[in-house]
Amino acid sequence: MPVELTSRRNELVKTIARLSGSAAYRKKKRLFVAEGARLCADAARSGIRPAVLLYTARAAERYESYLSPVRAASRAEYRISPSVASFLAGTGTTQGVFCVCALPEPLRGLPRAEDGRHCLVLENIRDPANLGAVLRTAEALGFGGVLLTGTCCDAYAPKALRAGMGAAFRVPLFTAADSPGAVRRLNESGFSTFAAVPDADALPVTALRFEAPAAVAVGNEGSGLLPETVRACSRRITIPMAGRAESLNAAASAAILMWEMMRGRPGGRRL
């Protein structure tokens, strides 16, 4: 029978809560927290070995099929009280299942043009839910990688993991502090690079046919791409909009752009 944790003051419980709430602490400890039976199982099945598994008595009964692979991979497991589960939960309701996992080692360099697959460049994305949604779409459409540049939020934040349905476990993630410099290196390596902008004189994405490998850069939710990053890209593209909205949020924009990149348009213009 696993040890039961019933106090929010327990040191392990406090450590897990801190991991959930602090990107800096996750980076320092090289650990992150997955919440939810399916997300924990996805982590284990994706080759991310859980260090600690925690679950309530009710969760043990309801989610046994999900818990089995996590339990087999975990180095330690604890039963937790509903009070502790509520304390650790990132939402108002919780399934009562959590696992602490080692952060995957960062991928070196940038996406490779030789792989012949499209990639997405994200610059200064601040909303974890937006980031998670983008990663989920990138995985669904078979993108070769996502490059997080500038001050993007943490892909392993609880909100990002929930929104991405575990896509961060499977999509190759690259990082670069210097956005314009990273785009220039993508150009040099063989990518065609495109800056997503709201400018009326930019090329409509619906008129293009993207030849792999291509990379599209999407900017911050409020301010868009840095001017230097736009200049570093080979072309500027935009999403035509018929309504009064001047822009879409980052996740919606990225989803439309990625779909257009992947499907190709028989009558489109080759670039």
Image (cartoon, rainbow, N blue to C red):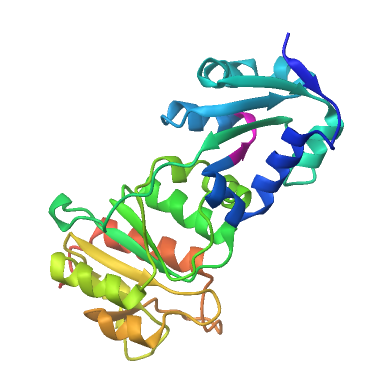
Depth order, front residue of 195/261 = 195
In the image, taking residue 66 as reference, residue 49 lies left or right, namely left
Which residue occupies the extreme top position in the image? 1
Quick check: 254 above or below 163? Answer: below
Residue 136 in view, yes or no: yes
Residue shown at 28% from the left, 62% from the top: 261
Residue 187 sits in quarter:
bottom left
Residue 95: x percent and y percent? Answer: 72, 31
- Please give left or right for residue 225 compared with residue 119 in the image: right
Please tell me which residue is depicted at 45% across the width and 68% down the height of the picture: 253
Prevailing secondary structure of the magenta residues? strand
Image quarter in which the C terminus is found: bottom left
Residue found 76% across the figure and 16% down from its top: 3
The image position of residue 144, as x and y in percent, is: 28, 51
Residue 16 in the image: state x and y as whole percent: 69, 39
Q: Is residue 259 left or right of residue 154?
A: left
- Residue drawn at (81%, 38%) of the image: 86
Q: Check residue 36 for magenta coloring.
A: yes
**Most foreground residue, 143 or 180:** 180
- Residue 58 percent across, percent down from the top left: 78, 20
Q: Quadrant for residue 238, please give it.
A: bottom left
Residue 151 highlighted magenta (yes or no): no
Q: What range of the chain is rendered magenta?
A: 33-37
The N terminus - image quarter: top right
